[in-house]
Amino acid sequence: MEEMILRMKDVTKQYPAFTLDRVSLDIPRGYIMGFVGRNGAGKSTTIKCMTDIIRTDSGEMEWFGQAGSKMPLEMKERIGYVSEEPAFYEEMTVEWTGNFVGGFYRKWEEALFRKLLKRFQVDPKKKIKELSRGMKVKLSLALAMAHHPELLILDEPTSGLDPVIRSELLDVFREIIQDERASIFFSSHITSDIEKVADYITVIHNGRIAASGDKLTVLDQWKLVKADNRYLGPRLERLLAGMKRGEFGFSGMTRDIREFEREWKRSFPAADYKVEKLTLDEMLVRMAGEEEEFMEQHG
């Protein structure tokens, strides 16, 4: 059985205009978990709950095998975090920043920090304000990795970066998990990045988990069905989400292709339809179009 670095079970957090609703997910040791959803779906709120930045209203949390309502300080030592918009003292140098951050960690390794800066081509003598956005992300990653975290949490780290830097960072993420000791929780709305590096995928939609599991299983669960418009009716619509209608046909996705096939054969035994695989990007686009209807039918 795989060891879980972090578990969330039925975690709920309510705000006036948004609810994180009974979120459950497991992060296994030694793998990359991709966490995807459109902006506003609840990705950052989930991360704040799992890192104990905000208190949950209900649900259970377990860090490194230890359950509790609040994360112990020693557990925070075992986690590294990179945000979408890193906050630094802009007038200070990279070197000063490393010394400052390193003082908070007992396992901080200055030699590793220097090695990472060299690899990422970040000049330790430069002031933070002189760094590009990509360089600031690389600095954040070096700071997060220099104390040997067992769980690296990345909140939209590749957002807004050019493809070359994004590709470079994805290579780094793959290397981090090579010794099977550390795990990465990689939140992003850039589905192509997730598909390239993730071993597991969790999809969040409107504050609720729509799918979670190993990448191939999640992508294989959902199928895209296409057929002529004359066959579309309430009985089929009940089985499909993310519906799109065109002049000559309709398409929709289903998580239970067998149930769809049974209904189709019962209703239209002589008619044909097409079944295609869904990309992660297509899945998210169709979920976003369905909103509450999607979650009521398939949540």
Image (tube, rainbow, N blue to C red):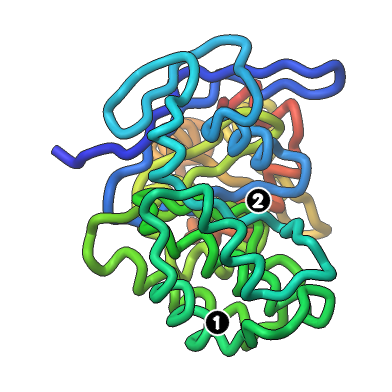
Q: Is residue 204 above or below residue 93?
A: above
Q: Nearer the viewer, residue 120 or 32?
A: 120
Q: Residue at x 23, y 59 (%)?
A: 180
User: What percent of the width, then of the height, locates residue 178?
Assistant: 26, 69
Let me know if residue 223 appears in the view. no
Structural crowding at the residue carrying mark 2, measured as other residues with C-alpha within 10 Å and reported as few (<14), some (14–19) or many (≥20): many
Q: Are marks 2 and 1 in contact (CB under 8 Å)?
A: no
Q: Earlier in the sequence, mark 2 or mark 1?
A: 1
Could you tell me which secondary element the residue under label 2 belongs to?
helix
Q: Left or right? Give the position of 113 relative to 46.
A: left
The quadrant of the rendering that contains the C terminus is top right
The quadrant of the rendering that contains the N terminus is top left
Give me the C-alpha separation between circle 2 and circle 1: 22 Å
Q: Is residue 32 above or below residue 195?
A: above
Q: Left or right? Give the position of 135 relative to 185.
A: right
Q: Amino acid under label 2?
A: Leu
Q: Left or right? Give the position of 210 relative to 259.
A: right
- Disc ID at residue 167: 1
Q: Nearer the viewer, residue 92 or 150?
A: 92
Q: Amino acid under label 1?
A: Ser
| Of labels 2 and 1, the one closer to you | 1
Could you tell me which secondary element the residue under label 1 belongs to?
helix
Residue, disc 2: 284
Q: Residue at x 62, y 88 (%)?
A: 164
Q: Is residue 56 above or below residue 196?
A: above
User: What percent of the width, then of the height, locates residue 186?
Assistant: 52, 55
Q: Residue at x 53, y 76 (%)?
A: 169
User: What percent of the width, then of the height, locates residue 154?
Assistant: 56, 55
Let me know if residue 115 appears in the view. yes
